[in-house]
Amino acid sequence: MAQPATTEGSGATLPAPQLFQQTVVVAHPAVAAAAGPHCFFGRITPDASPGRNTLTISGLPAGTRCISVWMTEFVAPNQPHAGGAFFYTTSVQLFNNGTQCRVIFNLDWGKFLPAACQVIYM
């Protein structure tokens, strides 16, 4: 059996993390001149996986210069709860002239989980 790729970290060789890719496309009403702060809440697809995930947000207005993203569990309406899953957002980076954003986050939970992003940008 072949050994998985490795990466360097903390002075030791570690197995490369398994990456999962999710996407969100900003709905048309959210795309406007970024003269002031704008926000949206978007369900990601597919569901977040345990461990490291990469989310790509597309459809931001060209020239977006500042963005904050928080990952959270997505629950059905009228079913809020204090769950045991933890989301850790570790990197948020604009690219492609501000029209896209890459978010790297970790899900500390034992299985796939519906998730969403809360976003403020300008």
Image (cartoon, rainbow, N blue to C red):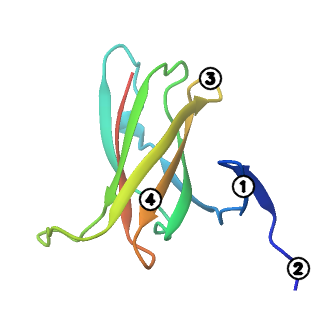
The amino acid type found where label 2 is placed reads Ala
- The kind of secondary structure element at disc 2 is loop
Identify the image quadrant of residue 32.
Answer: top left
Locate the C terminus and report the quarter of the image it occupies.
top left
The amino acid type found where label 1 is placed reads Ala
- Please, which residue is most extreme toward the left here? 78
Tell me if mark 4 has few (under 14), some (14-19) or many (20+) residues whose alpha carbon lies within 10 angstroms of its own: many
Mark 3 vs mark 2: which is more N-terminal?
2
The amino acid type found where label 4 is placed reads Ile
Q: What residue would you read off at disc 2?
A: 2
Disc 4 and disc 1: Cα gap in Å? 33 Å
Q: Nearer the viewer, residue 30 or 71?
A: 71
Where residue 83 appears, as percent x and y from the top left, is 22, 70
- Can residue 46 be seen at all in this image of the molecule? no
Mark 1 vs mark 3: which is more N-terminal?
1
Q: What residue is shown at x 25% (from left), y 68% (from top)?
A: 75
The amino acid type found where label 3 is placed reads Asn
Where residue 5 appears, as percent x and y from the top left, is 81, 64
- The kind of secondary structure element at disc 3 is loop
Q: What residue would you read off at disc 1?
A: 12
Tell me if mark 2 has few (under 14), some (14-19) or many (20+) residues whose alpha carbon lies within 10 angstroms of its own: few
Foreground disc of the pair 1, 2:
1
- Please, which residue is most extreme toward the bottom here? 1
Q: What residue would you read off at disc 4?
A: 44
Disc 2 and disc 4: Cα gap in Å? 33 Å
Foreground disc of the pair 4, 1:
1
Q: What residue would you read off at disc 3?
A: 97
Q: What residue is shown at x 49% (from left), y 22% (from top)?
A: 64
